[in-house]
Amino acid sequence: MKLIALDMDGTTLSSENQISIENIEAIKAAQEQGHVVMILSGRAPESINAVQRKYGLNCPIGGSNGTAVFAGGKLIELTSLAAEQNKAAVEVIEKESMPYKLYTNKGIYFHNDWKNRMERVIASGAIPAEFYEDENYGKMTRIPDKSEGVTFFDDLDTLLKDEELAIQKIFILALNPEQRNRVLTSMKTIDGVYVTISSPFNIEIMNINGNKGNGLKVMAEYFNIPLKDTVAIGDQQNDVPMFKVAGLSIAMGNAAEEIQKMCDFVTLTNDENGVAHAIHHYVLKDKIKETEFVLD
């Protein structure tokens, strides 16, 4: 039995935000052969589960970069930021007046000024042209409405008065590269936090123990699977911790060169059913042609 950890955006999902039939069938084939396939994503658990329902998948998950781990609908582990870490991070964000949102045990909280802050950055002309062409741009800049289950807030201190609220991840939209570099540098000085990215224009802040590597370890322990029998498939910097932990690491063909170089293998891109290719070739060891997984 193996544990296969799949990133979602840029990996299991195509650039059109869809999961192909080939990927779905490969995931189910692995499950039918007794392997455990988990979704290990920067997305909130609610978002991961919505995608699973849409495509008829049923996988255990590690949401918010592995800080919220669920199996069989049961919470296995929750790794949250401490109040002082939240305050220190938000102080930096507010100084730069950047759009941000919080991933919590009670859903996603958007700062009320998200739209105005984003519009000011756009109007400044500081956003590189290539950012607008990135497959993540639309997803990361979109503002959902309350009907989609998100909450809007004005002040962190007011939120922190709710003793039942736990924040697993702070997501910062960082469209200005110079500003992004300043904030990355500042965040890395905060004691006990883990700082990563999942696109050229965002920053994600978690507790030092909140990362995809730990999420993979927690799930492996839950299913009693040795780490040497784990497989991690992803494409971004936030996948690096699970690459380092997994017995077998596989980078997507659309991943940056530095990501590909650190992995054991490189599969096809997310628009060429790279997840299906990786599962069949490196886990199930099927003898198949690569062209079977390339969309027309």
Image: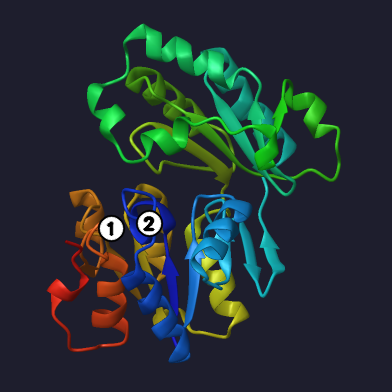
Q: What SS does tag 1 mark?
A: loop
* Image label count: 2
Q: Amino acid at mark 1?
A: Asn
Q: Residue at x 57, y 52 (%)?
A: 47
Q: Is residue 127 above or below residue 270?
A: above
Residue 277 horizontal side relative to residue 113, left or right: left
Which numbered tag is attached to residue 13? Answer: 2
Q: Amino acid at mark 2?
A: Leu
Residue 172 seen in the current view: yes
Asked if marks 2 and 1 touch (Cβ < 8 Å), the reply is yes
Q: Which residue is mark 1?
A: 270
**Dot 2 alpha-carbon crowd within 10 angstroms: few under 14, some 14 to 19, many 20 or more:** many
Coordinates of residue 247 in the picture (x, y in percent):
36, 76
Residue 97 seen in the current view: no
**Dot 1 alpha-carbon crowd within 10 angstroms: few under 14, some 14 to 19, many 20 or more:** many
Coordinates of residue 29 in the picture (x, y in percent):
40, 85
Q: Nearer the viewer, residue 5 or 192?
A: 5
Coordinates of residue 113 in the picture (x, y in percent):
61, 17
Q: Is residue 71 above or below residue 283?
A: above
Residue 102 horizontal side relative to residue 230, left or right: right
